[in-house]
Image (spheres, coloured by chain):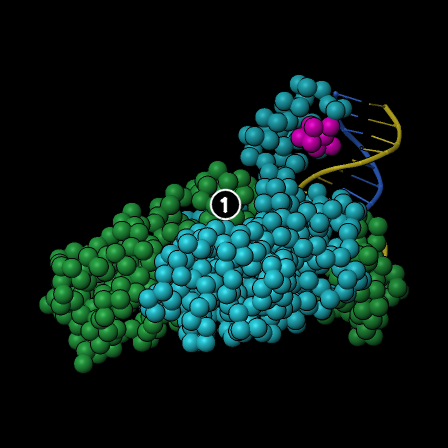
Chain colours: A green, B cyan, C yellow, D blue
DNA sequence: CTGAAAGCGCTTACAG
DNA sequence: CTGAAAGCGCTTACAG
């Protein structure tokens, strides 16, 4: 079956190419790398020898010389969650196929595991590290004395001198509330998730600020905190309806909560968006597009976040480090669950 | 800010350690690697020198000698989907922190992109390749003349001589139908997704076989094919109810479809599982646990699939390749939406 | 334009 | 037990 078991099939080496082309190893190297000091005819000979032998240069050996490995280490804490993947894809995007490669490790929220992986990655001489958190709250720094640059994505480092790229949840909350105001809504409830998440607090803060700017306040005076689940969305919506029959908009801290809200509203015979407009956060497509009606949501632009983080990491690797927290803006994705009040 | 910009901060090398310990590089190497021919006192000196300098051996250099890189290349076609992640986690699990590292590439379903990535990975001298598909249908082989072993996960290779690890969708369909039969259901409808997916067909085949074994047949004689969406789940369920008022079970090809089915049943005033039992596939936790009632589902055991694929790849790398397709069994995860008929 | 030599950081026989 | 030497696959001054 498969070739390549163990070390049997000699991989072809630059020496093989040189021998076949009848030149020295040095000349073969220069020819292949497009150095100018090689006669065209010689270059051709080398290339055809390389082709013939299916030569693929040993990148590891090359990097031994340059001191760069051409890889970055990416440690994520949220591989199963849905936040790190878009970030990772954005980073991969920025990487440009082939030039740079990603060594991926999953630390699963465990600091010890993270340390372990970081050590292993440094042993592999990664040119830089990207650390992707599971939730947007600040985390402790890996320290300033690492031999390579580090960028923290999604979860910022507590050390302001570190480089971090995060979502702007206050602004996201603002965008959602402004949309509701623009839709002519005035009795706007806010239902969100686990209060220990900075993101939950920040979105509420942003929403509240936007409402105050419009001369309004959150319906009932404050947001309802609970869990990031449909179940909580359903029961919290029932609570809101119990106390405020006249609610005309519900801003939800996640799409899951919003799905729960939609279910309860439908069951109470209320029309969305006619009677009540509903907005989610995260723009989780599979939930948002299958809702009835489809769910307007705030997208955190995580691919952009990943791309920015990768870009900053590359800049640092090239000798142009930048310090501090950079925030990526969110955007409104309008769908059927919000509309101007009739 | 960050140290490590560019090549400024000299990384400590084995030579530095040897110098500080007052021994030769060779001796330092032996001491650090636990070779027996080193005096204990010398070993101590070397170790403390290494500690003092925070020496971390250059794994790349070590691998130049051994011919092994200690990395595998993982090419996935479904980074954003939810099938490759558990597979990837299982593989990471099997890898054992530090010993082996994963170079991750996203090919996004594009064969050209895949080829490109495979070449880049071979240039980095990965010891093996794992190719994770986006859907369980067979895919074309990378060929038999690669210099390293390859294992195909989730989507098998068309070449039976390649090593593939897949889910057993026929058996999964069987498990679901047998569960319904065990619950005393007799008028069992099947609603599934896109008919071009082998998985859709296979699950129906398995369900049908199990029903026949029990002297039954799919309600209406055949399954309803459509799309992998809640929307289709809702409308297909309405169709079923229109034609078969007496349906007492619905087997759904995915959890999304099942969520749609639950919604329609609830709106028609039917009790689940009292009147109709509902079963999903994929065991997508966030959908299954938030459903009303919670959704019984078939889990494909993708982490196991990933672990098995990794294990086979390692075996092949160690010189013990295995050919052919290996199927990982699914399991029933019972929740509130199925129960014995009252 | 071409090639011999040194060297990247490490390990491994082979002598002492 | 310790060290000088060769070598892994490549690149880069430096001579010719």
Residue B54: percent from left, percent from top: 55, 35
Q: Quadrant of the C terminus of chain B?
A: bottom left
Judge by depth and name the residue closer to the eye, B176 or B161.
B176
Quadrant of the image occupied by residue A56: bottom right
Q: Is residue B254 visible?
A: no
Chain bearing mark 1: A
Helix, strand or loop status at disc 1? loop
Residue that protrudes farthest toward the bottom in the picture: A342
Q: Residue at x 22, y 76 (%)?
A: A274
Residue B135: percent from left, percent from top: 60, 66
Mark 1, other Cα within 10 Å: few <14 / some 14–19 / many ≥20: many
Residue B274: percent from left, percent from top: 39, 58
Residue extent of the magenta highlight: B26-35
Per the image, the residue denoted by label 1 is: A107
Q: Main secondary structure of the magenta part?
A: helix
Q: Residue at x 31, y 61 (%)?
A: A260
Judge by depth and name the residue closer to the eye, B29 or B91.
B91
Residue B324: percent from left, percent from top: 76, 57
């Amino acid at each position: 079956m498969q070739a390549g078991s163990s070390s049997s099939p000699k991989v072809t080496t630059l020496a093989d190419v040189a021998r076949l082309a009848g030149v020295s190893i040095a000349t073969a190297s220069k020819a292949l790398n497009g150095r100018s000091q090689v006669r065209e005819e010689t270059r051709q000979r080398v290339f055809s020898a390389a082709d013939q032998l299916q030569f693929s240069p040993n990148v590891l050996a090359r990097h031994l010389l340059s001191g760069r490995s051409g890889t970055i280490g990416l440690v994520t804490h949220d591989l199963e969650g849905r936040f790190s993947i878009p970030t990772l894809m954005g980073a991969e995007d920025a990487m440009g196929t082939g030039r740079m490669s990603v060594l991926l490790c999953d630390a699963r929220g465990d600091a010890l595991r993270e340390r372990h992986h970081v050590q292993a990655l440094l042993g592999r001489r990664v040119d830089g590290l990207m650390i992707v958190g599971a939730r947007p709250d600040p985390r402790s720094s890996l320290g300033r004395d690492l031999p390579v640059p580090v960028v923290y994505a999604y979860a910022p480092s507590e050390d302001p001198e570190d480089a971090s790229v995060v979502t702007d949840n206050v602004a996201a909350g603002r965008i959602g509330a402004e949309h509701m105001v623009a839709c002519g809504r005035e009795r706007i409830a806010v239902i969100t998730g686990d209060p220990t998440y900075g993101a939950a607090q920040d979105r509420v803060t942003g929403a509240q600020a936007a409402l105050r700017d419009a001369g309004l306040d959150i319906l009932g005076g404050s947001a309802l905190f609970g869990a990031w689940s449909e179940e909580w969305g359903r029961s919290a919506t029932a609570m809101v309806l119990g106390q405020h029959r006249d609610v005309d908009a519900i801003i939800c801290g996640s799409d899951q909560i919003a799905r729960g809200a939609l279910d309860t509203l439908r069951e109470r015979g209320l029309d969305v968006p006619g009677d009540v407009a509903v907005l989610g956060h995260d723009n989780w497509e599979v939930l948002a597009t299958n809702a009835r009606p489809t769910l307007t949501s705030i997208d955190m632009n995580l691919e952009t976040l990943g791309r920015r983080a990768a870009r900053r990491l590359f800049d640092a690797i090239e000798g142009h480090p930048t310090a501090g927290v950079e925030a990526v803006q969110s955007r409104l994705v309008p769908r059927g669950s919000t509309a101007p009040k009739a």
